[in-house]
Image (spheres, rainbow, N blue to C red):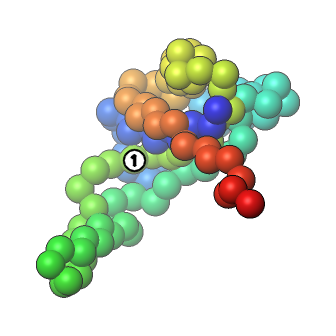
Amino acid sequence: MRYLTIYRPEAGEEGGAPSPEHMAAMGKLIEESMADGSLIDTGPLTPRDQCARLRLSGGAFTVSEETVRAGGYAFLEAASKDEAIEYCKKFLRVAGDGTCEIRQILEFGPPPT
């Protein structure tokens, strides 16, 4: 099963560069996770002031500022939600205080023929 996770850090400067030690630890985790197949893709997200929230309601679009901070995302391959949770625990131990939102990506079979 595939999961989308979004990391929301609790502290630090939004969009700021991490320390070299932190980058090395994160690089090691990413390398190991890609090698074992649990991590499909990951990357940082821009700060809120560079984002937008788009809403369609009653046929009209509204564009507003993004209010929710998010530091990065990851696409995971896991056998279960519990396994995805364990991966995110491992990630948070390296990334630091924050929250990981975990959402399963629904996979549908091929369309009937």
Instruction: Identify which residue is drawn at 53% across, 15% down.
Output: 82
Work out which residue is located at the far front of the displayed protein and give it.
113
Q: 112 left or right of 92?
A: right
The residue nearer to you, when weighing 26 against 36, is 36
Q: Position of residue 27 (x, y in %)?
A: 72, 34
Count the marks: how many? Answer: 1
Q: Quadrant of residue 33?
A: top right
Residue located beneath label 1 in the image: 70
Three-letter amino acid code of the residue under disc 1: Ala
Quick one: label 1, few (<14), some, or many (20+) residues within 10 Å? Answer: many
Q: Position of residue 7 (x, y in %)?
A: 45, 38
The residue nearer to you, when weighing 89 against 61, is 61
Q: 46 left or right of 35?
A: left
The vertical placement of 28 against 110, above or below, is: above
Q: Quadrant of residue 11?
A: top left
The N terminus, quarter of image = top right
Instruction: Identify which residue is drawn at 60% across, 31% down.
Output: 22
Residue 74 in view: no
The vertical placement of 64 against 10, above or below, is: below
